[in-house]
Image (tube, grey):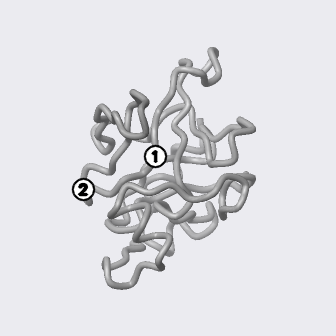
């Protein structure tokens, strides 16, 4: 499994995951990344999203129509910056991931999980077994 200690985070990763920050749109690793694989919590290594649910949203951050397992995501009311939004956090690590909005693809449930690249690590499909995520290979064989 891929895991990082909080002391190993870059400044941006720390700002996003530990201080509820947001990375710049269109200037992050996964906003336009559509390879086959999974996205795991950068701190705990827990699988959170897959490329099967990722879609192009023009918002500048990675967008997913749903989480891999709802139990691994915590949703909280966020009233920062004079707005009311739904914050998304990783259950295992309590890391800030981003926000969820109701403007996603209707055919996929209508949600858009807008996730900071700095909060997740991409694991390519062909590395799932090698890196300890082999149980998720079946997710791609639907």
- At x 65%, y 22%, the residue is 105
Q: Is residue 35 left or right of residue 106?
A: right
Spatial separation of the CA atoms under disc 2 and disc 1: 15 Å
Residue under the point 71% across and 35% down: 57
Please state if 122 lies on the left or on the right of 80 as rendered. right
Res. 37 image quadrant: bottom right
Residue 47 in the image, given as x and y percentages of width and height: 41, 55
* Picture coordinates of residue 103, whole percent (x, y): 59, 21
Q: Nearer the viewer, residue 141 or 70?
A: 70
Return the residue nearer the eye: 68 or 127.
68
Question: Vertically, is 96 above or below 13?
Answer: above
Task: Tell me if label 2 and label 1 are in contact, CB under 8 Å.
Answer: no
User: Label 1 neighbourhood size at 10 Å, few (<14), some (14-19), many (20+)?
Assistant: many
Outermost residue to the front? 82
**Which residue in the protein does label 2 denote?**
92
Residue 102: percent from the left, percent from the top? 52, 21
Q: Which residue is mark 1?
A: 98
Write the residue at 58% across / 70% down.
Answer: 127
Name the residue nearer the viewer: 56 or 49: 56
Q: Residue at x 51, y 55 (%)?
A: 22
**What kind of element bears circle 2?**
loop
Outermost top residue: 106
Q: Relative to 84, does residue 2 appear above or below in the rendering?
A: below
Residue 19 vs residue 29, the one in the foreground: 19
Query: In the picture, which quadrant includes the C terminus?
Result: top right
């Amino acid at each position: 499994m891929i895991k990082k200690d909080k002391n190993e985070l870059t400044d941006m990763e720390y700002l996003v995951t530990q201080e509820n920050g947001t990375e710049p749109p269109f200037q992050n690793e996964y906003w336009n990344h559509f390879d086959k694989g999974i996205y795991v919590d950068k701190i705990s290594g827990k699988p959170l999203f897959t490329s099967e649910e990722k879609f192009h949203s023009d918002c500048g951050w990675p967008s997913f129509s749903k989480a891999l397992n709802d139990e691994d995501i915590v949703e909280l009311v966020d009233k920062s910056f004079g707005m009311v939004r739904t914050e998304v956090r990783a259950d295992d690590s309590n890391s800030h991931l981003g926000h969820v909005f109701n403007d996603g693809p209707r055919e996929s449930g209508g949600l858009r999980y807008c996730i900071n690249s700095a909060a997740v690590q991409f694991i390519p499909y062909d590395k799932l077994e090698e890196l300890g995520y082999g149980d998720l290979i079946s997710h791609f064989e639907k």
